Amino acid sequence: MPKITYISAGGTERTVDVPVGTSVMRGAVFNDIEGIVAQCGGNAQCATCHVYVDDTAVGTLDPRQPGEDRLLDYTVCPRRPTSRLSCQLKVTEAMDGLIVHTPERQD
């Protein structure tokens, strides 16, 4: 099972096992990771699962779809080149070791 590391804005780091096919957002919710609100339940409607993907993984992930790209313009914390909606990141074996950083807040 791939291991995903979530790092909070305050620097708290947690590495958890996330089943293949599950979203990075669901992995956070199931493991009580702080910093991912997931208000819409993973339906790509609210952007409260915004994360910053570690630079080392950016090229290995599927590209953003237009809907995700638009929602990232409405995040509370600034959008960065590595910004993603964690609900749109489906975990694969190749994502083992993925590191995501949560922003300071999500609303």
Image (cartoon, rainbow, N blue to C red):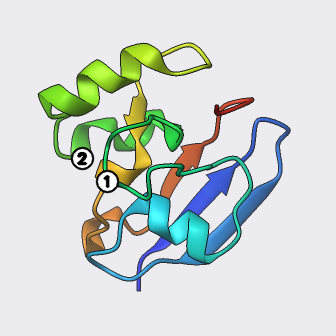
How far across and down, in percent of the image, does residue 42 sit? 38, 56
Q: Which mark is residue 61?
A: 2
Q: Residues within 10 Å of mark 1 (few under 14, many from 20)?
A: some
How far across and down, in percent of the image, does residue 83 sit? 43, 28
How far across and down, in percent of the image, does residue 25 sit? 47, 58
Q: Which mark is residue 97?
A: none
Please, what secondary structure does the residue beneath circle 1 have? loop
The vertical placement of 102 against 40, above or below, is above
In the rendered structure, which disc, 2 or 1, sits on the residue that comes first in sequence?
Answer: 2
**Residue visible at 31% across and 67% down in the picture:** 91
Q: Residues within 10 Å of mark 2 (few under 14, many from 20)?
A: some
**Residue visible at 14% across and 34% down in the picture:** 65
How far across and down, in percent of the image, does residue 99 sit? 53, 51
> What amino acid does circle 1 point to?
Leu
**Horizontal placement of 35 versus 66: left or right?**
right
Comparing marks 2 and 1, which lies closer to the viewer?
1
Residue 81 shows up from this direction: no
Please, what secondary structure does the residue beneath circle 2 have? loop
Q: Which residue is mark 1?
A: 89
* Residue in the foreground of this view, choosing between 41 and 8: 41
**Residue visible at 41% across and 27% down in the picture:** 82
**Disc 2, disc 1: CB below 8 Å?**
yes
**Horizontal placement of 2 versus 29: left or right?**
left
The vertical placement of 24 against 64, above or below, is below
> What amino acid does circle 2 point to?
Leu
